[in-house]
Image (cartoon, coloured by chain):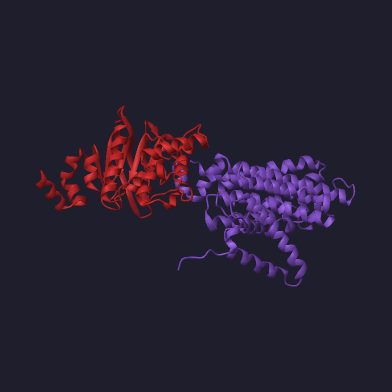
Amino acid sequence: MSESASEILRLDAVSRRFSGLQALRDVTFGINKGEVLGLIGPNGAGKTTLINTICGVTPANSGRILFLGQDITGIKTYQAARLGLSRTFQIVQPFAEFTALDNVAAAALFSQTGESLKSAREEARAHLAFVGLEAQAGQSAATLTLAMRKRLELAKALAMRPKLLFLDEVNAGLNSAEVERATSLIHRLAADGITIVMVEHLMKVVLNVCTRIVVLHNGMVIADGEPRDVIDNPAVVDAYLGQQYAKRNAARG
Amino acid sequence: MSRLNLALLLLIGCLAALPLFGGAYALRLGTVACMYAILALSWNVVGGFAGYPSFATAAFFGFGAYTVGVLLNDGVSLALSIPIAFVASFVLATLLGAVLLRLRGHYFAIASLSLVEVLRELTNNATDLTGGGMGLNIPLAAGSGIMADATFFFFAMWGLLLATALMVIAVSASKLGFGLNCIRQNETAANMVGLNATLYKSIAFGLSACFVAAAGGIYAAWVHYIDPSDVFDVLYSVKPIVMALMGGLGSPLGVVSGAFIYLGLEEVVWRNYIQIHSGVLGVLIVMLLLFLPHGVISLRPGMFWRKAKHV
């Protein structure tokens, strides 16, 4: 086994097929504790499917997934959540009728053992404050703006005390001020020692935050390494970044 | 406890005074009202809290009626056979729920409806045990006079209604109720935060079945004769849903009020329009649902006069 002690997640030839479409093809890589891994690739490359497969939403057809040495290949979604795998959704999934506070309280209540509704709400308040939503705690989730709902997703994910956090396009649809705010939140989480996997299209954010990049294309890993090396990789330029980006990047040095 | 739940307990408490004022007719009506309130409150757990439109109420009503009927014929006492029906239906519904509740929306509705038909046919064909289509005669329980009997069954049903209301109030304030609420709003997200949705839904389905089965048992002992087309009548599934919608989905007080209002309407309409009573009742229900989509519980004093608006 190529497992090292500091490895938190290991994917071993993971494949997933949706009838005719091979969404993931023998995906193999590991994630080390404390890493901020950027998962990039063109639309339809299988980034979200990979997250869904790890979290048990669409179980792998073949291959093996190890989380902290434990085989979690066929795991149920709620079990993954209790183990410390948490995620935000690309398309936000709030409990629309609940207040922001109860949304986060639900995450704390059901993912942790020994929580009561009261203690979960107390914790939820702290997580809302962390993402800057304390003023909206009593507001129903349906009335929040998109940027606030994205941060609510993040607060929910944090309330689950994640060991490994998947951020699925937390910046999509946000304006630049909102992106900056979200990026600084991610920096703070990484500083707290949470291992993060982020799917992101904004290369500026990826290069700013990530310590390593994995590139997916047609369900296959086509590059894996240091951010600077990956964006110079000709295969990545061809499949995703484009020649223009490469030239601009080269010009900047 | 919230004011609405206190009001619900108060309403049920007031109902207990019925034998002081009414005769045999009022007692019969009161017993039926309690029975339907139990059915509607139970449906509310799976339909109102969890958002799964179950049509299986009649299945568990019939199951309870036949369990108690058969047990009474075997010489088991009423006080013992009701709890047996209660526990057996909880177990049966929880197991069935784990299978059926994988379906959602219309598919679940149809599957739960077919459960009624399956149990009805099973009862029809198990002639040795249930008497099949001939029905089942049930021995008189006390036999101490008509009024004493009527009063006994009224209080039996009333006590069960009180227990159901307490269960529903307890569930709505608990982690279970909170979880069911999450499932109704977004089941994907509920799973993703670590909620075992299948388990929660199954427990909700079990809870929505056991009080219904106990009510079916009391009903069987009360009317002394049951047959499959009577107790597995799909109207036992439909009426509680209409009551819950009329009263206010999800609100225990609303659901019980809805049951009482529905039965009141049914009696009044039946008396005055003997030829076309179902038609008139249907129109009334449609009007109520059209103009009060969130049920009677959403009525506010301010709704009856319009505030002047700026032009």
Q: Is residue A152 visible?
A: yes
Q: Position of residue B217 (x, y in %)?
A: 75, 48
How far across and down, in percent of the image, does residue A9 sit? 34, 35
- On the rendered structure, is B116 left or right of A232? right
User: Is residue A61 visible in the rendered structure shown here?
Assistant: no
Who is closer to the viewer here, B135 or A52? A52
The residue sitting at the top extreme is A5
Residue B275 position in % (x across, y down): 75, 72
Q: Is residue A15 above or below residue B301?
A: above
Q: Residue at x 39, y 49 (%)?
A: A92
Question: Residue A27 falls in which quadrant of the image?
Answer: top left
User: Along the horizontal axis of the image, is B212 left or right of A253?
Assistant: right
Q: Colour of chain B?
A: purple
Task: Name the foreground residue: B66 vs B246.
Answer: B246
Q: Residue at x 40, y 32 (%)?
A: A70
- Chain A visual colour: red
Q: Quadrant of the N terminus of chain A?
A: top left
Image height of B187 relative to A34, above or below: below
Where, quadrant-wise, is the C terminus of chain A in this rendering?
Answer: top left
Q: Please determine whether, in this image, residue B260 is positioned above or below residue B97.
A: below
A25 or B108: nearer the viewer: B108
Q: How many marks?
A: 0
